[in-house]
Amino acid sequence: VPDFANLTGQIYVLDLNLSIAQDRRPGYLRIAEGLRQAIQSGRLKPGERLPSCRRLAGALGVHRHTITAATGELVAEGWLEGGPRRAHRVSAVLPPDFFRSRARHAPPRPQKKLKWRLARGAGTPHVASGDSADPCRYSFSGGGPDLRLFPYEEFRACMGQALRQSPSRLGDYGDPAGHPEFIERMAVYLRRVRALTGRRILVTHGSQEGMFLVGQLLLRPGDRVAVDELGFQPAWDAFRAAGAELVPVRLDGQGMVPEALEEALQRHDVRLIYLTPHHQYPTTVTLPAARRVAIYELASRRGIPIMEDDYDHEFHFRSHPIAPLASADPSELVIYASTLSKVMFPSIRLGFLAVPQALHQPLADLRTVVTRQSNIFLQEAVARWMDNGGFERHLRRMRRVYQERRDALVAALAAGRASGLPLDWTVPDGGMALWLDCGGDSDLVAREARARRLRVLPESRYRFKASHPGTHLRLGYASRTLEEINGGMELLLKSIAATTSK
Amino acid sequence: VPDFANLTGQIYVLDLNLSIAQDRRPGYLRIAEGLRQAIQSGRLKPGERLPSCRRLAGALGVHRHTITAATGELVAEGWLEGGPRRAHRVSAVLPPDFFRSRARHAPPRPQKKLKWRLARGAGTPHVASGDSADPCRYSFSGGGPDLRLFPYEEFRACMGQALRQSPSRLGDYGDPAGHPEFIERMAVYLRRVRALTGRRILVTHGSQEGMFLVGQLLLRPGDRVAVDELGFQPAWDAFRAAGAELVPVRLDGQGMVPEALEEALQRHDVRLIYLTPHHQYPTTVTLPAARRVAIYELASRRGIPIMEDDYDHEFHFRSHPIAPLASADPSELVIYASTLSKVMFPSIRLGFLAVPQALHQPLADLRTVVTRQSNIFLQEAVARWMDNGGFERHLRRMRRVYQERRDALVAALAAGRASGLPLDWTVPDGGMALWLDCGGDSDLVAREARARRLRVLPESRYRFKASHPGTHLRLGYASRTLEEINGGMELLLKSIAATTSK
């Protein structure tokens, strides 16, 4: 520890010894504190002149910049005057008492800690969780893509091109509704594969931000939103965040029951209907044409917007996917939402809304306030990937892979049924999961499976009111290899057998 | 146009001729529509068998997949039964009337378009706008970084590494609060340069999302937020989005006047104080120690949180930047927000909050509902860039460049003052802009400059109530080269001279 006594003929007992030894803050802050204490304690008097930076640095054994940083801090705080080229002096008028509480050796003033008042209940949100977070041996809990098969090298090249070409334009603030090049590609793609026309696209941070924005824009506290009684809970959270209350509507093996919806609309002043018509989440069933028609007509007659979440239409194995409600929307009441989380990977955080013209500007304005815009380089990279055919090539490949996996899953389940287990399912035409009726309490089965280090999610996890247990499991197969499917299903069949025999 | 007559012994007058010629939808949808019309019009009867896909494809001159797509659509809609390996037949029970409205030749049913009811006024948000959007010859309206000087190649390499290393982990869903590797680097950095300790970091999409989240979490409709009477309007929008009302507090040449704040707190039930203490936005002045102390003590005594927006502390030229309020926060009431928009580029959309422990989980929960999480690859790439020293190297370089530019700006203004113009300013110690008193109505000067294709923003643009015109301009110099500064200032001095002489 250096000796500060008699430096330049003045006595500096800066009490730095202890501070330097015990304090883990940056050196300049420790020195500033020593000087501050010396001033506060009166050892350095107002108007008194400090030795030069160079001399202080030499005496304290630190770099000159450390001293200038310390004195700069004290000038800013009002303890010192002068500098950077003039000598520093202790300020003629010292700042008030406050900084004393920062001093290490002054008794800390009793400070009352703020008691936070939150404007909303901090309810635990429902999380769309990834596969990699799951420490189980086999997990079928994720409904997501196989991240091991994404062509990162291809995408890296597109990202590299984006960062090379007019980088300062792409790095800047841009249109809050999204990067025009990305929007254009996406519009062409949606027109071709989903027959969407006459809509405006708004890029969002995943479909989650899209649902949140729609909730904020359309819902007032106490408004009702009709949802499937089994559904996608992160969407429910988004609507609840706007203060809305959910009205669960009965579901059967073909999706939402129109008569049940009609009854709900008669009973409640419903302001939004949330649907996943293509592959109902979590049951994977496609809403049949007659029901789609009936539900659309109910909404149209009552003037209620529909939010259509078309989250994994890309993966459909039988002929062609059905067209979304938004493709035939004469009343212009459908808000279409989708995402690249399934086609690419969740952490890309690129989703979009395709909305009727009237809704575009209000949503873009709101989006500006929430997150301003999305990363433009990412959007440009995806646009390039779409241009060079990589996007569709990846889709085609994944469609084959996922179909093969679905078939393997079905074969494994069929073997289980053949062996006498009370299993039942409808083979999903697409999507990334299978909805299995395991013939008994699926909560029990999931627990039993967990004990075997297999993770599957029971029906109750998706249910609005988890009052009765249910007999279904959702098996996310898309991200699992054939080996994992076979291994996992072996464990699952054992778990079901064990539960049934209890 | 192919001839559909007598195909396989049946008569198909599908009316496809016109549709194919005039319809711009995908081929399969046009064919589906032709078939649908044939069914609706009764030309194809329930139970009737269609020719094979192959034959239809040959007759219509399209690929077989186009036919399977069309029939798949009609099966999904309920018009056809059978397939994919069995022959298609017209459904025994046809779906209801709805799809008729999609048919091109049926008279469109009069459809009432939805009248949207918005839950919030769609006020035009204030936009932090970029430089590249501005078509002027010279623009000093952006307070942002020089995007031409960002080392995109360096960052591209980091992004490439991130996309190569455990890509499936980084592509997945992750912690909504942010990527641990990024948070760790950022915490070390903030401890070193801002003396921040004992806080939890939450990654956001720019500081905008941070302000939005804080507004949503802490403010109820009608709550008051104290702000500088001249300030950062996108933050105001974020608080207003939560239904809050703003209370403007008087500002002088040293920032917010504590006595004015005290008066505001006595008059209104203020629930949040929003400050930019380091470089007040837009006046660039550093809030002096005595005022920081006074404001903190006011907030502490009344139990009011402070949101401290520390948006460009990295660029400070005189000795060392002052420490933020959050670095000495015994009452744990300061919410610290910052961003990489100034250090890197705005479209990266990486900002963060550093908050007291108690606020972290509620904010992370809310964040989950709003946007779920940020792109993990981007966070990993920045973490790598911080690790390899690129981040700080870039900062050091930019600090030199911006200081040089500030000096050039000040020299140009000094020349103007020497030539007799009534200019006044305080040389900013840092930041990216200068607050110029041009001695007359700055709205007029800005208009006069605009006519000379120079863009500068007048005081009124930042003012809570634009009642009186004001004499200041904000000159964002950081993104302008020395040539641009000299050229721009020449035009500005002319504009001021022209306005003064009027």
Image (spheres, coloured by chain):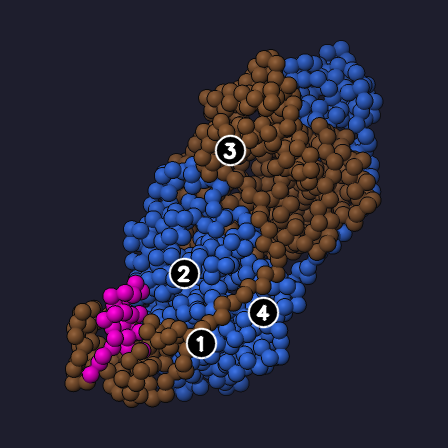
Chain colours: A brown, B blue
State the residue at coordinates (44%, 76%): B292
Residue A126 is situated, as x and y percent measured from the top left of the image, at 58, 44
* x, y percent for residue A334: 70, 43
Question: Are dots 1 and 3 in contact, CB under 8 Å?
Answer: no
Check the image and report above or below for B82 versus B96.
above
- Which residue is located at x 71 percent, y 56 percent? A220
- Circles 1 and 3 on the same subunit: no
Element under disc 1: helix
Q: Is residue A489 visible?
A: no
Q: Tag 2 or tag 4, which sits nearer the N-term?
A: 2
Identify residue for label 2: B198
Cα distance between the residues tagged 3 and 4: 44 Å
Position of residue B244 in the picture relative to residue B176 (left or right): right
Tag 1 residue: B292
Letter of the chain that mark 1 sits on in the rendering: B
Q: Does the magenta stretch include residue A23?
A: yes
Q: What residue type is labelled 3?
A: Pro
Please report whichever mark, 4 or 1, sits nearer to the chain's N-terminal start: 4
Mark 1 vs mark 3, foreground winner is: 1
> Label 2 to label 3, Cα distance in Å?
38 Å
The span from disc 4 to disc 2 (Cα, nearest Å) is 23 Å
At a point 41% along the width and 65% down the height, the residue shown is B312
Residue B271 badge: 4
Q: Is residue B424 visible?
A: yes
Q: Give the range drawn in magenta.
A: A11-36
Mark 4 and mark 2 in contact? Answer it, CB < 8 Å: no
Would residue A28 be counted in the magenta stretch? yes
Residue at 47%, 60% (x, y): give it. B355
Question: How far apart, in angstroms, are the residues tagged by discs 2 and 1?
Answer: 20 Å
Q: Which residue lies furthest to the top in this view?
A: B9
User: Which label sits on residue A145?
Assistant: 3
Q: Which of marks 4 and 2 is in front?
A: 2
